[in-house]
Image (tube, rainbow, N blue to C red):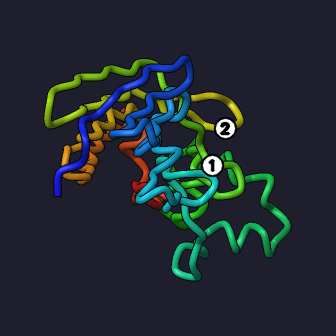
Amino acid sequence: RVLAPFKVHDHRDFIEVSVGDNSSFVIISKVTGGITSLNHRGHSILGKNGMIPSFTRAATDNDRGGLALILDFMLLSWARPLFFYFGASAYFSHLCHWEEYGLAQDHPPRVVCIDTKVEDTQDLVCVTTSCLVKTSQRGVKLFEQIATYEIYSDGRIKILNKIVPQKRLSSIPSLARVGLS
């Protein structure tokens, strides 16, 4: 089924793609680079926060442990930064690494959109957002993200995400998550 022709409205903080009778179909934020609203037959199908990039998740028992638990048990948690400084980080859990690099769930990184481009053809609207993902507390750059939303005239939306980690993340054993939520 082909929708009515698209209308693209470029607002200060968001791009709105509407169809036919100007009813909003999808809204993409110029602030976060994510989809803030997606409507089908006049009903919103996303939660109130929309769909934004996510780089954290809840830690499981397998993510915890290592030297950090021993240091905590011995009341030496203050010494944790010394172990990281002297290269003993391999003995720490995934969770410790995530916290050290600014990927903890209680302080998730923030996404800052730096550029937005719109290409509008008869059958396709392509919105590309270029964003920086930074730590929430110190503002250290973690990733560069380029998200491309291809919105087709039949209602499909294809999302392409390119995530480029900064060199400082090469020593982290694993990332908690790279996705949308």
* Vertical position of residue 23 compared to residue 103: above or below: above
> Dot 2 surroundings within 10 Å: few (below 14), some, or many (20 or more)?
some
Outermost residue on the right side: it is 75
Q: Is residue 126 left or right of residue 134?
A: left
Q: Residue at x 37, y 28 (%)?
A: 129
Viewer-proximal residue, 42 or 95? 42
Q: Amino acid at mark 1?
A: Pro
Viewer-proximal residue, 130 or 37? 37
Q: Residue at x 45, y 51 (%)?
A: 38
Do the CB atoms of the residues marked 2 and 1 lie less than 8 Å apart?
yes
Residue 29 position, x and y percent, is 50, 33
Residue 103 position, x and y percent, is 57, 50
Q: Quadrant of residue 96?
A: bottom right
Residue 88 position, x and y percent, is 52, 54
> Dot 1 surroundings within 10 Å: few (below 14), some, or many (20 or more)?
some
Viewer-proximal residue, 116 or 91? 116
Mark 2 or mark 1, earlier in chain: 1
Q: Read off the residue under disc 2.
A: 136
* Vertical position of residue 31 compared to residue 52: above or below: above
Q: Residue at x 38, y 21 (%)?
A: 116
* Element type where label 1 sits in the image: loop
Q: Residue at x 55, y 55 (%)?
A: 97
Q: Quadrant of the N terminus?
A: bottom left
Q: Is residue 119 left or right of residue 75?
A: left
Q: Read off the residue under disc 1.
A: 108
In the rendered picture of this protein, how many numbered marks are placed on residues?
2
Q: Amino acid at mark 2?
A: Ser
Q: Is residue 145 left or right of residue 63?
A: left
Outermost residue on the front side: it is 21
